[in-house]
Amino acid sequence: MLKKIKNLIRENRQLYRDNLLQLKELEWAHVYHDSIRGKQWLERLPLNIGRWAGNYSFFYVLNRILTDFKPNSILEFGLGESSKFVSTYLENELRNSNHLIIEQDETWYQNFKLKFQLSLRSKVAICPLYKRKVFNCDINSYSGIEDIINQNFDLYIVDGPFGSENYSRYDIVELAQGFTKNDEFIIIIDDYQRIGEKETVQELLKMLKEKGITIYWGEYSGNKSVGVLGTEKYKSIKSF
């Protein structure tokens, strides 16, 4: 009987947490739609928000960053709904910006092109996945990105490759090894509610601290969580 009571309490707690997150997601949906009001080119943009794509908190944060900071150079891991969003910004508001997308699947890219035309300043590079070890854990990683990415960016959107159980999407940590104290940047980490992404962010923050780079942090949660970190220039990200 005691075991059944404990299980019931556990199930009710989980149900409460799930309901709370769903309510937060609904609130973020309203906040997001308010944030794009008046931008007809965004209001008309067909987006599939949630599921494998970013949720409403993710798109709200992305919209604020593109609106408030107008990054000139954008690197995105994973081709999808956020790629449409950024590319639409390039065509309408960020007319001097460039956008590089790293995608793992050529077939997905070809199907994507049949449904949406990216800006000419949004470029896609296909980097197939391979398995490797990080801290003795198997992770998914992009192959050959060191031959494609030869500069630092103002904005990094990390929503790929496929997540790993531990140290997920660790490529961003290795890219950040090239950062210096003079660099200004923002990094968005989608799916931050997962253990693998949290571990990657911990390693990223540790490495940046060792470099003497002051970092500001914000976390925005609905059905999923998005983590955002940035340098002094972008410290308002912690209070969007």
Image (cartoon, rainbow, N blue to C red):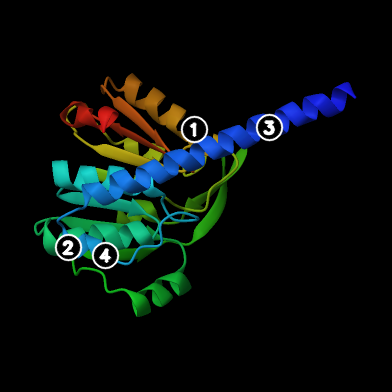
Mark 2 belongs to which amino acid?
A: Gln
Q: Label 1's element?
A: helix
Image depth: mark 3 or mark 2 in front: 3
How packed is label 1: few (under 14 Cα within 10 Å), some, or many (20 or more)? some
Task: Give the label on residue 40, or none.
Answer: 2
Extreme residue toward the bottom, this view: 114
Q: Are marks 1 and 4 in contact (CB under 8 Å)?
A: no
Please report whichever mark, 3 or 4, sits nearer to the chain's N-terminal start: 3
Task: Give the label on residue 12, or none.
Answer: 3
Frontmost residue, 95 versus 61: 61
Task: Give the label on residue 198, or none.
Answer: 1
Q: Residue 96 in the image: x percent, y percent?
A: 9, 57
* Image quadrant assignment for residue 68: top left
Mark 1 belongs to which amino acid?
A: Lys
Frontmost residue, 157 versus 52: 52
Q: Which quarter shows the C terminus?
A: top left
Q: Residue at x 46, y 40 (%)?
A: 23
Q: Residue 189 in the image: x percent, y percent?
A: 39, 41
CA separation, marks 4 and 2? 24 Å
Mark 4 belongs to which amino acid?
A: Lys
Mark 3 belongs to which amino acid?
A: Asn
Image depth: mark 1 or mark 3 in front: 3
CA separation, marks 3 and 2? 43 Å
From the viewer's perspective, tell me whether residue 96 is left or right of residue 141.
Answer: left
Q: Are marks 3 and 2 in contact (CB under 8 Å)?
A: no
- Please name the residue that numbered disc 4 is placed on: 123
